[in-house]
């Protein structure tokens, strides 16, 4: 895990300790987990986001992320952030 991911996760966790329902922080942690290859954790977080997102602020992004995680990637596709 790169240092920037680690720093971002630390900051989002700090926010979530104060407000466990902070939708912005939850969604960003889910995105980071996806980028880190932690897809099971990412799906759980996205499900939590969907339950909290009553106004639909992140609904399009949540659905998009869940669809990406549901589709198996071929090994040649690599991971997000690889060149």
Image (cartoon, rainbow, N blue to C red):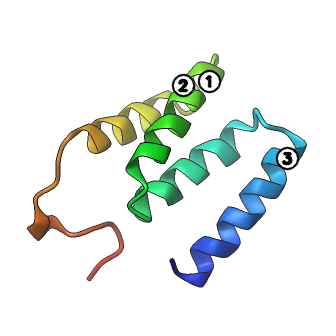
Q: Give the Cα distance between marks 3 and 2.
A: 19 Å
Q: Depth-wise, is mark 1 or mark 3 nearer the camera?
A: 3
- For label 2, count other residues whose C-alpha is less than 10 Å away and answer few (under 14), some (14-19) or many (20+): some
Could you tell me which secondary element the residue under label 3 belongs to? helix
Image spot of residue 74 (x, y percent):
10, 59
Image spot of residue 45 (x, y percent):
55, 38
Left or right? Give the position of 26 relative to 14.
left
Quadrant in which residue 58 is drawn = top right
Residue at left offset 47%, top offset 46%: 42
Residue that mark 2 sits on: 50
Residue that mark 1 sits on: 53
Could you tell me which secondary element the residue under label 1 belongs to? loop
Left or right? Give the position of 48 relative to 83.
right
- For label 1, count other residues whose C-alpha is less than 10 Å away and answer few (under 14), some (14-19) or many (20+): some
Could you tell me which secondary element the residue under label 2 belongs to? helix
Left or right? Give the position of 55 relative to 62.
right
């Amino acid at each position: 895990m790169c240092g920037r991911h680690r720093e971002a996760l630390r900051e989002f966790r700090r926010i979530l300790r104060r407000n466990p329902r902070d939708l912005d922080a939850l969604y960003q942690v889910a995105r980071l987990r996806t980028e880190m290859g932690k897809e099971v954790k990412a799906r759980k977080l996205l499900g939590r986001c969907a339950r909290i997102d009553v106004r639909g602020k992140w609904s399009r992004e949540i659905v998009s992320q869940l669809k990406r995680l549901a589709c198996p990637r071929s090994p040649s596709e690599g991971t997000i952030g690889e060149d």
